[in-house]
Image (tube, rainbow, N blue to C red):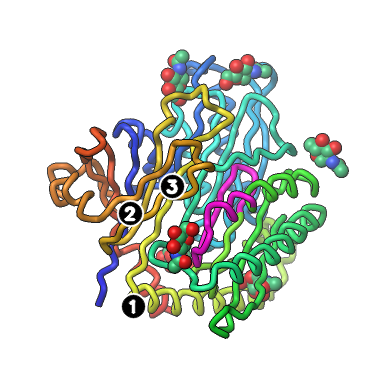
Amino acid sequence: MAQLNLVVLLLAVPWLFTGAIVVVDGQHYTAYMPYCSNTDNYTMASAYQVNLVSLMSDLPQGAINNRGFYSSMAGEAPDQVFGLTMCYVDRNWTQCQDCVRAAAAGVQQTCPFSREMEACYDACVLRYSNVSFLSVADPTTALYMILRSSVVSDAPSMVAARQKLMSQLAAGAAAAESSPQLLGLANGSVGYTDSLGGQQVIYGLAQCTRDLNASECTRCLMKTISDLSSTFPNDTYGAVKAYSCYVVYSVGGNFLSISIPPPAPSPPPAPSPPPETTVSPAPTTSRNKKALLAGVLVASSLVSIIGIGTLVWFLQRQRHTRNALQKEQELYMFNEEPQVLDMLNDELFQGNVPRRFKYSELAFATRDFNDKEKLSEGGFGSVYRGYLKGMNLHVAIKRVSKSSWQGKKEYESEV
Ligand SMILES: *[C@@H]1O[C@H](CO)[C@@H](O)[C@H](O)[C@H]1NC(C)=O
Ligand SMILES: *[C@@H]1O[C@H](CO)[C@@H](O)[C@H](O)[C@H]1NC(C)=O
Ligand SMILES: *[C@@H]1O[C@H](CO)[C@@H](O)[C@H](O)[C@H]1NC(C)=O
Ligand SMILES: *[C@@H]1O[C@H](CO)[C@@H](O)[C@H](O)[C@H]1NC(C)=O
Ligand SMILES: *[C@@H]1O[C@H](CO)[C@@H](O)[C@H](O)[C@H]1NC(C)=O
Ligand SMILES: *[C@@H]1O[C@H](CO)[C@@H](O)[C@H](O)[C@H]1NC(C)=O
């Protein structure tokens, strides 16, 4: 049986890498290439820091009470701080809550003394600023995610179906912005017949932060969908995270389990609490659970059969080029299958083309994942120091442990 062996590589100086990792309750949450402002920093015990801390203590519970999205502000000008956080609905509600808590608790680890921060995590996004940014989309792409070893046989049919699906979803997500119950998102699927006569289904999700109106949501999604098209010519899965919106698709849907955040917990006990309160969220939850379980079952069996790897990488932020430190950051995940890998879309990366690495190259760089090179140990695996000779580059390499996938199996047997 193919061994699942995911590896993440971050091309960055190690201190910067560790700086982007938030450690909460011994769990590591990676802020993928955060944007941290680096001028006009606030100082220790300043009014700005006090306001920031106060805002960050409100955001997580606000988001948990508000179905995975919350925006707020604290203090008065010139020390006023604005912030928002949102969960991605292709992660479950537990992951969402953990993410918003960790992201908020970790802002001072992620961007010490910055007046502005934008960061995408696996399950959520968090932004704060001294300038009000609410209601204006930031379509800057922060992160791409791809499943390695996984391309479709008939790319033109897939691309056509994906385009159709994504424009439907973009319209749906924008329309949902005007209806609070719809959470600024749309998910769905379309079927297509590939050139071999096979019936395929492509699943997708488009999601905007809920501070946006329909036109701002559309503006953000158009940008991410166009990034999606140019970045994933024939992949079976692709995701683009921007700071104000998110799109993801999966051919077959195995890697896309949507779990719509539950309605707010009921308000504090009323004078005469109705006895049936505990049953209220049941219908949707059990349906979501079933959908999730189905996804998990197929996903875990597929994973064990073909040993899929995931590749993640960053696009350099174009808008904030002033932040020279972030120039070379890229992140990769992939499997150990030795393979000659193609460069992706040079144009998109403007010469800053991400490179994919063979497992053996990374094993070599870390002296076979030697314990002496270990920088940290996290919930999803260990981080190693490494040196890529060919590129004369010191790197931090994260080896994702199987346990994060085993978690799914445990979940499967629990249910
Ligand atoms: C401001 O803070 C950032 C980290 O958030 C740091 O990288 C930068 O050097 C600081 N800038 C100044 C001028 O101190
Ligand atoms: C907000 O912070 C930036 C630095 O990130 C600074 O350049 C700008 O002047 C500040 N704006 C206001 C209105 O305080
Ligand atoms: C949507 O929001 C943007 C930014 O706040 C604003 O400029 C625009 O006028 C709004 N559009 C509509 C139709 O309300
Ligand atoms: C969106 O996802 C939810 C949860 O998985 C599912 O119940 C629903 O049917 C999906 N909607 C569409 C249109 O596929
Ligand atoms: C997938 O797309 C890449 C880039 O266009 C191409 O090089 C590769 O041959 C394609 N693979 C398949 C199996 O179509
Ligand atoms: C959420 O997902 C994580 C990781 O896949 C899993 O370990 C956990 O059991 C899931 N929790 C629920 C409530 O589905």
Residue, disc 2: 379
**Residue occupying image coordinates x 45% and y 38%:** 33
| Left or right, residue 390 beside residue 176 | left
Q: Position of residue 356 (x, y in %)?
A: 34, 50
Earlier in the chain: of badge 3 and badge 1, it is 1
Earlier in the chain: of badge 3 and badge 2, it is 3
**Residue occupying image coordinates x 65% and y 49%:** 69
Q: Position of residue 234 (x, y in %)?
A: 51, 64
Residue, disc 3: 313
| Left or right, residue 91 beside residue 402 | right
208 or 52: which is nearer to us? Answer: 208
**Start and end of the magenta stretch?**
226-246
357 shown above or below 148:
above
Which amino acid, by three-letter code, is at mark 2? Gly
For residue 305, the mark is 1
Quarter holding the C terminus is bottom left
For the residues bearing labels 2 and 1, Cβ distance under 8 angstroms: no
Quarter holding the N terminus is bottom left
